[in-house]
C-alpha cells in the first residue's frame, strides 16, 4: 500500500476529526476519497503530509512513517490541499519558479509540466486572468514538481465546467495509466469519481465506512433488466418483485436473479436477457453515510 493509517485519531478542541481511522490507499491506482462535509478528508491529507499532528495512531507513506520521516515523505509526495497556493499577480511560469525554489529544485522541468497540463501557450499570462480550471491545472503542475510518486488532490474537480472536468480527468488518468503514479482525489461529485477512479475509500465522521475496488463497492443495485417476448405475462409472474416496464425492458428487484428466473419459468416464460443493473456510486455513498452529503 502507498499510504496506510492505523488507528489515527485527530481532535481539534472538542471536535473529533478522525476517530481511530484505519485505512489504506493502494499504490499505482487512482483512488476516489469520498465523504460528506466534515468527514475528515482534508484532515487525512494534512496528517499524511505532516501538516497536522495526530493524537494517536501511525501513518506510513511509501513505507516511511509520518513524523520521524516526514522530510523524506514530502520529497516524494505532491499535494494540493484546500485552496491552491497561487500568486495571482504572477504568470504561470513565475508561479512554478517560486514553487521550485521553495522545494530546492531547478526550473528545468517547468516547460514539460506546463505542456502536460496544457498551459504552455498561456504560461506568460497572469494567473488572475485564468479560469478556475486553468488554475487547478497549474496547481497540479506545481504538485508534480520533483516527479513525486504520490499525488494527494483535495477537490481538484470542484467548480470546473464540463470541459475543464474532462481535461483534468484525462490528465489524472494519464498519471496513473502512463506514468504509474499513485493518485488520491477527494471529491463530492460521485459522477466524477465513478468515471475516474479504480478504487474508492469512503469515510464518515472520521471513520471508515467502505473501501475497495470501485466495482466491488458499487456492486449491484438489486434491480434486474429483463427482456421477454410476453411483457404482460412477465409482469404478472413477477408481481412479488415490484416489476415495471421501461422502454422495451421489464425491471424487477430481487436479491438474486435466480428468483426471477424461477418465477418466469413457472409461468412458461424464458427471458432472452436477465442482467443485474449496477448501482450508482451516489446511491451507495448516500446509503453508507445516511444521506449525509
Image (spheres, helix red, strand yellow):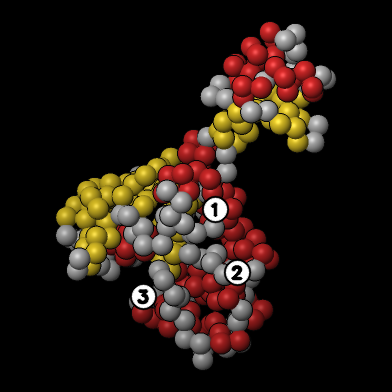
Count of marks placed on residues: 3
Horizontal side of residue 158 vs 50, given as left or right? right
The image shows residue 281 at horizontal and vertical percentages of 54, 46
Lower sequence index among marks 3 and 1: 3
The image shows residue 61 at horizontal and vertical percentages of 30, 54
* Image marks 1 and 2: residues in contact by CB distance under 8 Å: no
**Residue annotated with mark 3:** 103
Label 3 and label 1: CA atoms lie apart by 34 Å
Toward the right, the furthest residue is 229
Q: Residues within 10 Å of mark 2 (few under 14, many from 20)?
A: some
Quarter of the image for the N terminus: give it: top left
Label 2 and label 3: CA atoms lie apart by 28 Å
Horizontal side of residue 99 vs 232, given as left or right? left
Question: Residue at 40% of width from left, 42% of height from top?
Answer: 211
Corner quadrant of residue 154: bottom left
Horizontal side of residue 49 vs 95, given as left or right? left
Q: Say which of 287 and 90 sits in front.
A: 287
Question: Residue at 57% of width from left, 35% of height from top?
Answer: 221
Question: Residue at 28% of width from left, 60% of height from top?
Answer: 17
Residue 173 is labelled as none
Q: Say which of 235 and 100 sits in front.
A: 235
The image shows residue 248 at horizontal and vertical percentages of 81, 31
Q: Say which of 121 and 44 sits in front.
A: 44
Tag 3's secondary structure? loop
Question: Residue at 76% of width from left, 24% of height from top?
Answer: 227
Corner quadrant of residue 15: bottom left
**Residue annotated with mark 2:** 160
Lower sequence index among marks 1 and 2: 2
**Residue annotated with mark 1:** 190
Label 1 and label 2: CA atoms lie apart by 14 Å
Amino acid at each position: 500500500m502507498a499510504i496506510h493509517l492505523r488507528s489515527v485519531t485527530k481532535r481539534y478542541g472538542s471536535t473529533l476529526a478522525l476517530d481511530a481511522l484505519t485505512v489504506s490507499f493502494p499504490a499505482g491506482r487512482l483512488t476516489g476519497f469520498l465523504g460528506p462535509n466534515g468527514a475528515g478528508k482534508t484532515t487525512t491529507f494534512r496528517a499524511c503530509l505532516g501538516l497536522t499532528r495526530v493524537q494517536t495512531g501511525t501513518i506510513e507513506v511509501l513505507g516511511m512513517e509520518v513524523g520521524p520521516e516526514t522530510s523524506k515523505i514530502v520529497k516524494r509526495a505532491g499535494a494540493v490541499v484546500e485552496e491552491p497556493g497561487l500568486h495571482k499577480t504572477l504568470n504561470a511560469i513565475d508561479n512554478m519558479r517560486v514553487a521550485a525554489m521553495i522545494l530546492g529544485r531547478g526550473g528545468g522541468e517547468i516547460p514539460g509540466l506546463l505542456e502536460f497540463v496544457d498551459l504552455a501557450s498561456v504560461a506568460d499570462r497572469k494567473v488572475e486572468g485564468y479560469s478556475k480550471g486553468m488554475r487547478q491545472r497549474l496547481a497540479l503542475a506545481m504538485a508534480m514538481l520533483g516527479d513525486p510518486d504520490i499525488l494527494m488532490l483535495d477537490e481538484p474537480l470542484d467548480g470546473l465546467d464540463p470541459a475543464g472536468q474532462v481535461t483534468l480527468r484525462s490528465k489524472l488518468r494519464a498519471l496513473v495509466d502512463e506514468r504509474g503514479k499513485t493518485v488520491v482525489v477527494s471529491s463530492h461529485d460521485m459522477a466524477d469519481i465513478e468515471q475516474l477512479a479504480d478504487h474508492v475509500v469512503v469515510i464518515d465522521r472520521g471513520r471508515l465506512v467502505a473501501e475497495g475496488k470501485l466495482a466491488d463497492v458499487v456492486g449491484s443495485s438489486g434491480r434486474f433488466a429483463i427482456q421477454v417476448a410476453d411483457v404482460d405475462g412477465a409482469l404478472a409472474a413477477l408481481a412479488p418483485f415490484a416489476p415495471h416496464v421501461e422502454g422495451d425492458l421489464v425491471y424487477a428487484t430481487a436479491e438474486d436473479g435466480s428468483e426471477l428466473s424461477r418465477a418466469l419459468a413457472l409461468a412458461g416464460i424464458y427471458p432472452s436477457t436477465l442482467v443485474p443493473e449496477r448501482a450508482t456510486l451516489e446511491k451507495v455513498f448516500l446509503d453508507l453515510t445516511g444521506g449525509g452529503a
